[in-house]
Amino acid sequence: MSNPEDAFQELVRIFSSRDNQVLEIEIIPPSLGAAFLQDGCSLGITKKTLVQGFTVARLLFFDRLMPMSEDDIQTTFSANAQSRNTDSAITELMLLFDCEHLTACNWRKRRLLAAMAHHPSIPNQTSATTELLEAELTLMSSYQCSPLHRHTKSPTLWHHRLWVVVHLLQRRHWSPEDLLKLQRTELEVVLRAGELHPKNYYAFSYMRQLDVLLAATVGKTTGQPKWEAYSAQSVVERVVDWCLANPRDISGWSFSLYLLSKAPDQHRPEAVGKVVKFALNVGWEGESLWTFIDQASRQFGLESVIEDIMLSHCDHEIRSHGSQKAQDSQRTRSWQTWLARARVCWVIDGQRQDI
């Protein structure tokens, strides 16, 4: 496909027909012999074809969309579906090529704000506006859950996603159960982005901001003071399991500490103990995991819990050694101290297996 106009039209068709589904988009090598490969919601596109489509979309954006006033944007919602979808797809294509294109992202905000102002005069206004906002979330998920070079860690896209959620929460009443479902859905997006781009600071920062936002929403609507603790409790196991599958990811471990600080006290020993047992069983020496153990012991007073797990993992030969070491290093304890004690356990275990 050597014609930029053809590349643009094909991309518009794909984005316009996704029907609010999340696409998985990947840049494919030209050696495959096809400009596009599509199987259901999975889309492959060559870099050359994407550049061709972007050049056309950028020209249309600055010639047609940027000069629009707020009234002009509102009138597009009364236009036919094809024209409306093309206008939206122009900026969708631009953000696919350049996820930090702030002008295109801001135009999408203008479009959504115009829709919110336009829909009150239309029957069934709340559902219509909600559908637009939910469609925007699925578009962001298409970018942030796809194996693209920069989109999973784009501050522009994560900020835009939070903006959309803020307005979505304002458009209708949310029960605590609905908010928990939203939280879990957003968490899965964040964890997927974390897998695609390790140590994804922007993704986990978004999740912290969302947690504060949801807690404030519950406080306004239901006045439940313990919702924050309950919500943290409901997802902490999922996050810890994700961290154990990605033990080098310091951003994930930091978010786990954040959740544990919100969770009820009685759930902390189990979560931290699970991490300690994993590290001892597999012989993990990575700094991120042991930093989590050290910080959890300090923040939540779990030193004795961790020590008991370590001592139970080893035989009686190192119990006195471990106890003395704990006393000697109480003031200077760090993640390296915990790791050193774990290494003693591994040495003893190795000697026992050799016998």
Image: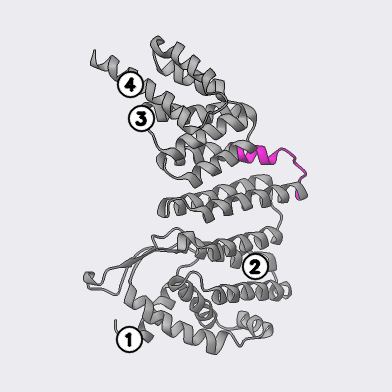
- Residue 119 vertical position relative to residue 216 in the rendered view, above or below: below
Q: What amino acid is found at the position of numbered circle 1 in the picture? A: Asn
Residue located at (57% from left, 52% from top): 205
Q: What amino acid is found at the position of numbered circle 4 in the picture? A: Val
Quarter of the figure with residue 104: bottom right
Distance Cα–Cα, label 4 vs label 1: 65 Å
Q: Position of residue 147 (x, y in %)?
A: 38, 60
User: Mark 2 or mark 1, which has the lower sequence index?
Assistant: 1
Front position among marks 3 and 4:
4
Most frequent secondary structure within the magenta stretch: helix
Residue 223 included in the magenta stretch of the image: yes
Question: What is the magenta range?
Answer: 221-233
Distance Cα–Cα, label 3 vs label 1: 56 Å
User: Mark 3 or mark 2, which has the lower sequence index?
Assistant: 2
Image side of residue 195 versus residue 260, left or right: left
According to the image, label 3 marks what residue?
A: 283
- Residue 304 vertical position relative to residue 97 in the rendered view, above or below: above
Residue 13 included in the magenta stretch of the image: no
Q: Position of residue 318 (x, y in %)?
A: 41, 14
According to the image, label 4 marks what residue?
A: 347
According to the image, label 1 marks what residue?
A: 3
Which of the image's four quarters has the C terminus?
top left
Could you tell me if the residues under marks 3 and 1 are in contact, i.e. CB atoms within 8 Å? no
Residue located at (44% from left, 58% from top): 145
Q: What amino acid is found at the position of numbered circle 3 in the picture? A: Gly
Front position among marks 3 and 2:
3
User: Mark 4 or mark 1, which has the lower sequence index?
Assistant: 1
Quarter of the figure with residue 55: bottom left
Q: Position of residue 56 (x, y in %)?
A: 43, 85
